[in-house]
Structure formats: C-alpha cells, structure tokens
Image: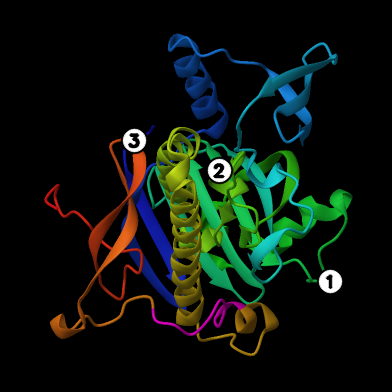
Amino acid sequence: VSAPSPRYACWNGENHQFNTEHLISRPLFDAKLMEDLGSSNINLINGQVRSAQDSGHQWQVIYQNQQTQKEIITGDYLVDARGRTGPLKGDHQMRGPETVSLLQRWQTSTTGNKHGNIASMASSYRNGWAWIAKQGSKLYTQVTLSAHDHRIPKKAGLRQFIASELGQIPEVVQWLESTLPTDNPVARASTCRLSGNLVNQRLIRVGDAALTADPLSGNGIFASLSLGLAAPAVINTILDYPERASLAQQFYRDKCLETFLRFCRTGRDFYALEQRWTDQPFWQERRQWPDKQKLHKPFPPEQAQIKKRPILAQGQTISKEVLIPPDHPLGLWRVAGIA
C-alpha cells in the first residue's frame, strides 16, 4: 500500500484538493492477500467456479482448475464473495440507474506533472465523470457514463472513444500529456445494486456480491470490509445458536440495506453539486436517486430513542439496548468501547 497521496476534484467548474487516498496495484494487492492466506495454513484452491448448487443438506461447488479439469468441493455453508461476477439472475432488492465505466491504462514518458508523482483526480463533464490516477510513469483512467448512452461503441472502438471523452475535460488533458494508451480498454458495469438474497440458513453474500454502491461515493472497499467483518458472527450465530438465527439474518439484511443507502445517498449528493448540466439525462437521474432523504439529519436530544436491536458481540449476534439517532437507524451500542 502506497503512502497517502493527494486527491483532487474538478467539479461544477471549481478545483479543489480533498483529503488523501492510498493508491494500490490491485493485481499486486490480491497476490499478497493470497500469500497471507497460504502462510495462515488456509487451503487455497486456484480455479474458477462454474456452478454452486444447494441440495438442501449440502452445497456442491463445481470449479475448473488450472488444467481446465472440473473438480467438486462440498460444504455445509456457502459464503459468496464473487463480487459483481456472482450470478444474481435478476434477484435485486434495489438497483440504481444503469451505469458503465470504461477503463484505460496509459504510459507516460515523464514521472511527474504539476500534481506530483502519485496523485488522483475526479472530474465531471457533460456526459458523466472521469477518474484518473497517476503512479510514476503509469496512469489509469476511468470514464463513467450511462449504460444507455447510445454513443458508446463496440469493443473495437472503445480506445478512440475513451480518448475522445477525456479530451473534453481540460483538467484531465493536462494529466495525459506525453502519454500513450497501453493494454486493451475494458468496459465494466458499475450500477448500484443491492442483492435480494443476502443471507439465509445456508448462504451469505459479502462484498460486491451483496451490494455495490456508486463508485463516486468512493467507499466500495470500505463497504466490502465492513460486511466481511460482520459475516463470521452472523454465520456463527446461524450455525451454533439456531434460536437466534432469524435475529442474525435480520441484522445482516438491515446492515446491508443501511450501508447501501448511505453510500448511494453520498453519491447522489456529489451528483447534485454539479449544476452545469442538470438538463442532461445522466445528471438528472443520479441527482435524485435513491430518494430525497437527507444523509445527515439534526438530532435534538429529546428525539433520542433507546430500543433493543441485534448487535455483534463476542463473535455472535445478540439483542441489546442501543441508542438510535436519525443518522444511525441500526443504533449505537458502544462509543469508544463504552456501552
């Protein structure tokens, strides 16, 4: 993980530097995670899942190994962490405006610009918004558009189309001086979605397999880690404390819904800050979805409520009295470790 680097924003015609972020090489990061798993004596199977079927008593997962042979592994409980690639078959509790992100890598002959050697920037423009990250001589751009934008070409025309879109953003053009595109461009779905089948007696979805927020909210990894940390206690309760299984499942569903709505509303408020293209369908849709509810509400003390809610404690889900402010409908049961 790199040192924190500056994060810039060019939004609504104004330039700002907001906070910092850590830029990582995802392939290298994933490889190091695999090393950590191996060093922890966790059996790591390198293969691609082809199907997962539940007989009602046992899961059967069919996967293809590196020699393209099909293998089978069985288990009592399934954690689906396949990200957006996990097949949902239309099983969505909520789904936002259809969105696509076009990705392109670049190589530059210079290692620095006025923003430095390592930096990132988000910039809005008429058709959508772009994100660019720089690490030394390498750049990475992501253009996010409506999936219904009829101008998006087939794969063969993507590289030229991406360059044309980025060319409409003066701030990005400065970053791309003396650069050439490398690798093939990639189109990825980036629609906000919340799975309808989040958890049951034999299955739990975590990370992007459970929910995907708008990339503009910038909290995808945080959301995935948050759900990943909650899942073991939920599973433990379902398996070892069946009398509280429904409580654990409700806790997880509520947590996913609240996490999803919070990040989607964060994205909505960023879209609403852009005032120059309010007549464009891309901006019209996203500045009012998922609802009009404020992200932060006033909290007069007289509105404080104390109710019993499911919480995570000692590796399981239990019921506990919590304080419920408007900003946290799931409730707060500890502050700085104090109940």
**Comes first in the chain, label 2 or label 1:** 2
Tell me the crowding category of disc 1: few under 14, some 14 to 19, or many 20 or more residues within 10 angstroms, Cα based: few
**Relative to 271, is 295 on the left or the right?**
left
Q: Which residue is mark 3?
A: 315
Which residue is nearer to you in this view: 57 or 49? 57
Name the amino acid, label 2.
Answer: Leu
Which residue is nearer to you in this view: 190 or 5? 190
Tag 3–tag 2 contact (CB < 8 Å): no
Instruction: Provide residue 321's location: percent of width, then percent of height.
Output: 23, 60
* Extent of the magenta region: 286-294
- Residue, x 41% and y 43% (percent of image)? 230
Q: Which residue is mark 1?
A: 150
Name the amino acid, label 3.
Answer: Gly
Q: Which residue is mark 2?
A: 139
* Residue 263 is a magenta residue: no
Tell me the crowding category of disc 3: few under 14, some 14 to 19, or many 20 or more residues within 10 angstroms, Cα based: some
* Residue 287 is a magenta residue: yes
